[in-house]
Image: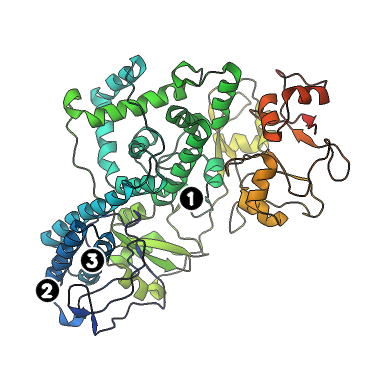
Amino acid sequence: MIRYIPLIGLVFLAGCAGPRTLEPGTRATPAPGTADTAGNTGTVEELPAPGLTLDHVTPADSLATRDPDRLLADARQRYDAALAALERSDTTAARSAVDEVLGLLILLSDDQKHAATPAQADLLRQLGLLVDRIQDRHRAAVEVRGSIPRVINRRVTQQINLYLKDKSLGILKAAYQRSGRYTPMIREELAARGLPNELQWLPIVESGFKPRAYSWAAAAGMWQFIYDTGKRYGLQRSGWVDDRFDPHKATPAALAYLGDLYGMFDDWFLALAAYNCGEYRVLREINRTGNRDYWKMRLPRETRNYVPKFLAVLHILENPEKYGVDWPETHHPHLFEAVRIDKSVTLKHVAGLLDMPQDDLKALNSDIRYGVTPPTGYSLRVPLGAGTTLLGSLDELPESNFKPPPEVRRYRVRRGDTLGHIARRFRTSVSRIRRMNGIRGSLIRIGQTLRVPGRNYNNRLWVDQAPSYGTPKDALSHTVRRGDTLIRIARYYGTSVTALKRNNGLRRDLIHPGQVLRLPGAGIDGGRGIDGSPLTYNIRSGDTLSRIAQVFKVSVTALMRANPDVQARRLRIGQRIIIPG
């Protein structure tokens, strides 16, 4: 029976260490005769400068001449060397020693019949604490962007009391227990971006730290990304894989989004509110009232409760004695490596080959939608030590001919909706919507959730994911589409991101669908393009005249003079206005 080392101790995507990636045709071969940092002769590969990886490991000696007890003793020796280096504030030497310990533990686990001993498990736990200490030296040098005030008012107290109820407290404890799988990795990502450490607990409010969480609003994953926002931050989706369900891919995207929101509002309460309901809603409220105090804003009910819920979680986590809460021991992070598979295989067959539960394999690869890897290739995560077995048996795995079904969306019926209206909106037929939802007549209710046809699949990505631009020659402007980035637009039009930002008064790289960007070389002269035509702009959701004036560096008065028929309080989405010089 094939066994593997328990998934405890460390997260190797945490920035200090990364998963070992194995590919067909590539295997690590020892190079004897090289002295390591502890004075032993063995295999030493050059270590990457900034971080620990499992691509480069340093076994103390050939596995053929060392028994498990000796390997474990050598691992402890290098662990002690890492401790000594950290005491000398030599983090480079400490990282190298930790990398050697990881290499020896991999050698121990590569023998699939060798079960992890309590001594190995104890060393892994100690190693996890040491990695955190090494990273603490780097966190201290990174300036944290703002702080999250520990406000406690009536709304926060109300949420605290709700969490402390028996059923809710059980749910909260379960979320806290799951958090141990991911918080070490999240803390490393926060430290790298200089974001407040408290944000590591935001997934408790979002999803309860469930990687496969899915909401009624089609938000998915531990960080609850909707499709468009996820795509904006690099999370892809195909018929086989949805990156939103992968905590290791979604976490950097979520923190990048939160960092952009904080840069936009310079206030963490407003940034968190915008993360929940969208930056447009918050900007519109600020523009409408001139108020930037979250506690006085008229936002959707869910958003009004969102920040109080997060603060309530922080208060309970930081003061368990005050609230009489005994936290359970958290789950240990997954310990894994990645194997590149260039054909479509089922997780069921892989789990059978490795003699491990299929659910455990699914937990390591939570972004796989239907239990089948894509035919275009996939880096499959397996328990540490199982990669060699899988790599040597890839030819035995039968290739799957699975084809993903068309996308299905969920739509909540609103006031005034009819089946005909919904069918036109989603470019389908009334009869198909009836069949999908078991509806015989035409009666639908407000608030009812309907299944409607979504995107079809074209064997690589959803058909509307690849934007196609017009001819770049003589183009004066570009209307931002879903999936656009400044880098992609600049590359297409043969310009630079800096020039695009300067030409449009942008301070950050954040752009939105519908936004019209002036292209470098398509400047204006007295309100005219290079071909003499007036420079125009199409109104999009959330726009105001003051915001448009600020972007194009003109006055509101000049905008009003150039557009006498435009009323500031009655802007229409899609309305075209002239931008004066």
The residue that disc 3 covers is: 97
Residue drawn at (46%, 38%) of the image: 258
Left of 516 or right of it: where is 130? left
Pick whichever, 157 or 466, lies toward us. Answer: 157
Asked if 86 appears above or below 410 in the picture, the reply is: below
The residue that disc 2 covers is: 70
Secondary structure type for disc 1? loop
> Closer to us: mark 1 or mark 2?
2
Q: Indicate the quadrant containing the N terminus: top left, top right, bottom left or bottom right.
A: bottom left
Residues under labels 1 and 3: Cα distance? 36 Å
Find the residue positioned furthest to the right: 532
Q: Indicate the quadrant containing the C terminus: top left, top right, bottom left or bottom right.
A: top right
Asked if 462 appears above or below 536 in the picture, the reply is: below
The three-letter amino acid code for the residue at tag 1 is: Asp
The residue that disc 1 covers is: 242
Q: Residues within 10 Å of mark 1 (few under 14, many from 20)?
A: some
Residue drawn at (15%, 72%) of the image: 71
- The quarter holding residue 194 reads top left
- Residue 93 percent location from the top left of the image: 25, 65
- Residue 541 percent location from the top left of the image: 65, 29
Asked if 173 appears above or below 285 in the picture, the reply is: below
Q: Residues within 10 Å of mark 3 (few under 14, many from 20)?
A: many
Asked if 562 appears above or below 98 in the picture, the reply is: above
> Closer to us: mark 1 or mark 3?
3
Identify the mark nearer the N-term, 1 or 2.
2
Secondary structure type for disc 2? helix
**Count of marks overlaid on the render:** 3
Residue drawn at (56%, 39%) of the image: 409
